[in-house]
Amino acid sequence: MSLSVILAGIVTGLLLGIFGSGGSIITTPALLYLLDVEPKSAIAMSLGIVAVTATLTAWQHWRRGNVNLKITAVFGLFGVAGTYAGALLGVVTPVVIQLTIFALVMYAAAWRMLKPAPVHKSVGAVCADCPDGGYCDDLDYRHIAMHGIGVGLLTGVVGVGGGFLIVPALVLLSGLSMKQAVGTSLSIVSVKSFAGFAGYAWAVPIDYSLMAAFTAIAVAGSVVGSRLCHRLPADQLKTGFGGFLLLVATYILIKSVLGE
C-alpha cells in the first residue's frame, strides 16, 4: 500500500469526521494525480469511498444525538434522485467540463469556509419546549427538497459528496446548530454518494482493491475526526480548510483544464 493512499485516506476521513464534508474534494484529486486513476473512474471510486466512510461517521454522530433524521429523509430522498440523474449525465459529460465545474465548486466551498459565519437561531436543535423533547419543526421542507435535488445533481456530475454545500444549507436554511449540521450532512452525503456510485459503476472500470484499501484508511481517520469535531476550534479549522481548497482548485485548473 503506497504512502499516497495512506495519507489521502487519513485526510479524507479526518475532513468528513470534523466538517461533515470535504471527503471527495480530497479523494478525487488524490486518485487522479497521486494514483493515476482515469478521471471518470476516479469520480466513481471517490463516491464509493465517501459513501462508506460517511455512513460509519454519521453513525458515530447519531450516537451523540447530532443527526436530524427527518431532514435526512427529505434532503436525502430528493438528493438521491438528483445524484443518480447527475451521475448518468456525468458519464457522458466531457472530462474537461467535469474538472472545471469541480474546481469552481471548490472555489465556492473555499469562499464559504473563509466567510465569517452569521449568527443564527438554531431552530433545528433539540428543544426543551417541544412536547416530546425533540426537534423544533418549523422548517420549510419544500426548500429542503429543492436543495436536495440541486446538490444531488452536482454530486453526481462532478463526484463530490456535497457536504460543504449541505452544511451551510442546513445551518442557514434549516437553522441547525453546527454540530447537528455536520452529523446530518454526513447521513445525507452517505445516501447520495451510494446513489452516485451506482450511477457510475455500470459504465466505468472500478479498481475495487484500491477502493477498499483507501476506504479502510479513511474510516480510521473519520473515527479520529468525529472526536476532534467536539474539541478543536472550528473557526481556525474552517479557515485552514478554505485556504487548502483554494490551492487544490487552482492546481486542478492549471494542470487539467488549462493544460499547463
Image (tube, grey):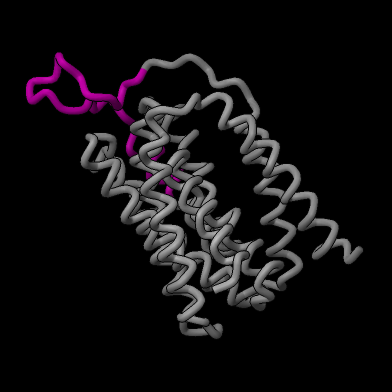
Q: Which residues are magenta?
A: 122-148
Is 181 above or below relative to 156? above
Is 200 above or below relative to 216? below
Is 232 above or below relative to 186? above
Residue 29 found in image quarter: bottom right
Q: Is residue 168 magenta?
A: no
Residue 216 found in image quarter: bottom left
Position of 15 compared to 61: left or right?
A: right
Q: Name the outermost residue toward the right.
A: 260
Q: Nearer the viewer, residue 133 or 138?
A: 133
Residue 237: give x, y in percent of width and height. 56, 31
Q: Is residue 143 magenta?
A: yes
Residue at point 37%, 30% (across, down) = 230
Residue 174: give x, y in percent of width and height. 38, 30
Q: Can residue 48 be seen from the camera position used here?
A: yes
**Which quadrant, please, contains the N terminus?**
bottom right
Position of 221 compared to 259: left or right?
A: left
**Which quadrant, please, contains the C terminus?**
bottom right
Is 233 above or below relative to 165? above
